[in-house]
Image (cartoon, helix red, strand yellow):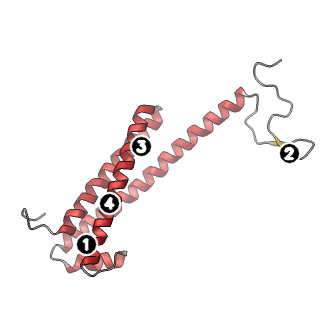
Amino acid sequence: MHAEGTQHPLEAVLEQEVRCTESLLECLEAERLALIRRDLEALEKAIQDKVQHSQLLEQLERQRESIVSALGFDTDPRGLTRCYRSLPQAEQLIELWAQILTNIEVCRTSNITNGGILELGRQHVEQALSILRGQSGTPSLYDPHGATAANLGKRELGKV
């Protein structure tokens, strides 16, 4: 970082993006823990925080693209690299950008993991409901009319 007042606006935005992606990673970790613990209050807070940081990250991305465009560069990956290299703080900008990309990739992986945890929980609930309904939870079978029926020959729980 440079002395107060001499920092390039692009560097400031990139630093904010790094902080925002780090906060997003923390939100995803909180979401994962809430899913594992089945803590609905913590899950709701983590999701709200995740949405808030995602929106902030989008806003910062627009700011970065605006600055890069104003400097006369395209906002695609090649244009960004050329822009960063054209500035005196090139090394710092490239390092910040690399950190952002790394953080975003970790966020993506964490989000996929959280989705898997959520899907597994959904499947368990679905299986439990099938059992309570008297269904085997196994793949559907065909009835004599060719329609699928998961509970052929089964009784619902509590029915005689």
Q: Which residue is disc 3 drawn over?
A: 47
Q: Earlier in the sequence, mark 3 or mark 1?
A: 3
Query: Residue 27: which numbered mark, if any?
Result: none
Q: Amino acid at mark 4?
A: Gln
Q: Amino acid at mark 2?
A: Ala
Which quarter of the figure is the C terminus placed in? top right
Q: Is residue 128 left or right of residue 9?
A: right
Q: Is residue 118 above or below residue 128?
A: below
Inter-mark Cα distance, 4 to 3 = 18 Å
Quarter where residue 13 is shown:
bottom left
Secondary structure under tag 1 reads: helix
Q: Which residue is disc 4 drawn over?
A: 59
Q: Which residue is disc 1 drawn over?
A: 67
Secondary structure under tag 4 reads: helix
Name the residue at 34% across, 63% down.
Answer: 101
Inter-mark Cα distance, 4 to 2 = 51 Å
Which marked residue is nearer to the observer: mark 3 or mark 1?
1
Q: Are marks 3 and 1 in contact (CB under 8 Å)?
A: no
Name the residue at 15% across, 76% down.
Answer: 88
Q: Which residue is disc 2 drawn over?
A: 147
Secondary structure under tag 3 reads: helix
Inter-mark Cα distance, 3 to 2 = 40 Å
Secondary structure under tag 2 reads: loop
Q: Are marks 4 and 1 in contact (CB under 8 Å)?
A: no
